Image: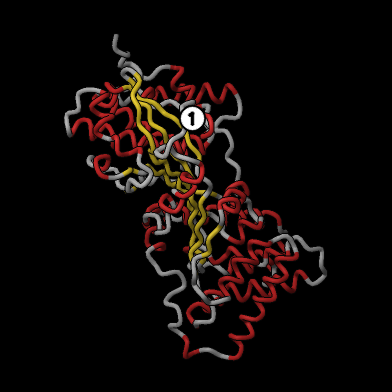
């Protein structure tokens, strides 16, 4: 008896298993070992920049965070301080043009990310002065102080910038995990059972408006996911969609034929490719991706060192099996991080005298006044144009883990299921991206 077509989300179910318990069979040379999985990380890493619209989303998130901080300060000072030109609030206001004291639109964010940060490295080399060298030395001393006052990552990134190498800064899997853990916690998508029930109801309702019906249990399964689980879910959904496209393109009629067609996917040296076109399964190992935006807590070490940054959730199939009419896929999963350390219009506020805020020093006000004034002239970015410092990229990749998912073969053939996958990808992407939605 065939499985019911009323299930739209049954194209995937999460069945996480540890690698050591994935199979009871005796291991052989073709089976994946832990070392094999970790060797996949470089192939899954995103060493190239994410698409412009993803970087624009990060820039929008960063502007939102900056404006929240400015509004907090504005509501915290009295009228007499607002009249004081040297007050923290007025220092910040002078750091922005009037057009920058507002949220960014998608178009404005896109225009910003297409700029080359502060400009061309060394383009103002002939304008160097003794004061520029002293300013470089001053920020070197400030970064030393930051390391001693609870801002080690801010110190590390500033020192790398001042070293003028421009080489990418790469974090180990352990460091990347710690960095992600320091990002603003999203946790469970629902904080209570009533919230979970409402989200499940809302998901059913919004899919129903598209002519797609799912069961309550399927909606509840998604509503109970954390943001990271949902991101991996969407990454795996991309791979399933490409597998479905292959089934339809080559008119594959049975699970056994499909398994034979993609049998090479089990090989450890099978080439990987990120595109999800219809033929990707025949010659390559497809990688499903979901791009997320990670935010940091205001005034934290992560805020001053990175602000907001991109996370890339990757899912790569390493085994495909059939059980009756079900296709089981074993995925290798990992999360990458990407960020640009530069001083363009959207990000130059990130190091605004933050290491002084945690000090109870009588000199803190003078330090803030000095650094805010210099930042207002975009002098830190000017070091890049003078050739005294150099902007760089930040990369990181977590360890690789595995998960088994399953899909009914008839769901791979179904146009209705294809519509369900597309609708889920749109709805859940919107849910994970609270800023103005920019489709991946």
Judge whether 136 appears above or below 258 on screen: below
Q: Residue at x 50, y 77 (%)?
A: 384
Q: Position of residue 36 (x, y in %)?
A: 46, 45
Colouring chosen for the image of the structure: secondary structure
345 or 19: nearer the viewer: 19
Q: Position of residue 246 (x, y in %)?
A: 23, 35
Judge whether 85 appears above or below 78 on screen: below
Q: Position of residue 165 (x, y in %)?
A: 51, 75
Apparent side of residue 251 relative to residue 325 in the rendered image (left or right): left
Circle 1: element type: loop
Q: Which residue is mark 1?
A: 22
Q: Tell me the quarter of the image containing the C terminus.
A: top left
272 or 153: nearer the viewer: 272
Residue 207 seen in this snapshot: no
Q: Position of residue 298 (x, y in %)?
A: 64, 54
270 or 399: nearer the viewer: 270
394 or 185: nearer the viewer: 394
Q: Residue at x 30, y 39 (%)?
A: 264
Apparent side of residue 326 relative to residue 223 in the rendered image (left or right): left
* Residue 94 quadrant: bottom right
Q: Residue at x 46, y 39 (%)?
A: 231
Judge whether 173 appears above or below 138 on screen: above
């Amino acid at each position: 008896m065939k499985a019911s077509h009323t299930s739209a989300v049954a194209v995937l179910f999460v069945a996480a298993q540890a690698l050591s318990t994935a199979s009871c069979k005796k291991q052989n040379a073709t089976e994946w070992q832990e070392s094999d999985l970790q060797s996949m990380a470089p192939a899954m890493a995103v060493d190239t920049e994410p698409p412009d619209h993803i970087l624009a989303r990060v820039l929008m998130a960063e502007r939102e965070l900056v404006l929240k901080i400015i509004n907090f300060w504005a509501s915290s000072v009295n009228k007499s301080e607002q009249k004081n030109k040297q007050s923290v609030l007025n220092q910040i206001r002078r750091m922005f043009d009037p057009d920058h004291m507002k949220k960014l639109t998608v178009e404005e964010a896109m225009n910003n990310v297409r700029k080359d940060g502060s400009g061309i490295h060394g383009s103002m080399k002939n304008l160097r002065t003794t004061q520029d060298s002293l300013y470089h030395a001053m920020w070197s001393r400030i970064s030393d102080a930051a390391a001693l006052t609870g801002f080690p990552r801010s110190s590390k990134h500033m020192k790398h910038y001042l070293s003028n190498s421009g080489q990418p800064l790469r974090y180990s899997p352990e460091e990347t995990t710690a960095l992600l853990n320091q990002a603003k916690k999203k946790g469970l998508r629902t904080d209570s059972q009533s919230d979970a029930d409402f989200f499940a109801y809302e998901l059913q309702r919004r899919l129903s408006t598209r002519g797609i019906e799912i069961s309550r249990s399927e909606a509840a399964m998604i509503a109970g996911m954390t943001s990271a689980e949902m991101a991996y879910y969407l990454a795996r959904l991309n791979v399933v969609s490409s597998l479905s496209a292959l089934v339809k393109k080559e008119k594959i009629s049975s699970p056994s034929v499909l398994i034979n067609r993609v049998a090479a996917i089990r090989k450890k040296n099978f080439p990987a490719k990120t595109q999800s076109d219809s033929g990707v399964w025949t010659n390559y190992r497809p990688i499903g991706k979901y791009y997320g935006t990670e935010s940091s807590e205001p005034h934290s070490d992560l805020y001053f060192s990175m602000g907001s940054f991109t996370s890339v959730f990757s899912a790569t199939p390493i085994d495909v099996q059939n059980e009756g009419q079900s296709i089981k896929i074993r995925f290798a999963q990992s999360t990458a991080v990407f960020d640009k350390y530069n001083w363009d219009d959207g990000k130059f506020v990130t190091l605004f005298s933050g290491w002084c805020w945690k000090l109870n020093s009588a000199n803190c006000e003078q330090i803030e006044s000095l650094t805010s004034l210099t930042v207002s002239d975009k002098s830190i970015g000017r070091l890049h144009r003078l050739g005294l410092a150099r902007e760089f990229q930040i990369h990181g990749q977590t360890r690789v883990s595995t998960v088994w998912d399953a899909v009914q073969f008839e769901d791979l053939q179904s146009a209705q299921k294809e519509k369900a996958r597309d609708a889920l990808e749109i709805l859940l992407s919107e849910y994970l991206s609270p800023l103005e939605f920019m489709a991946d």
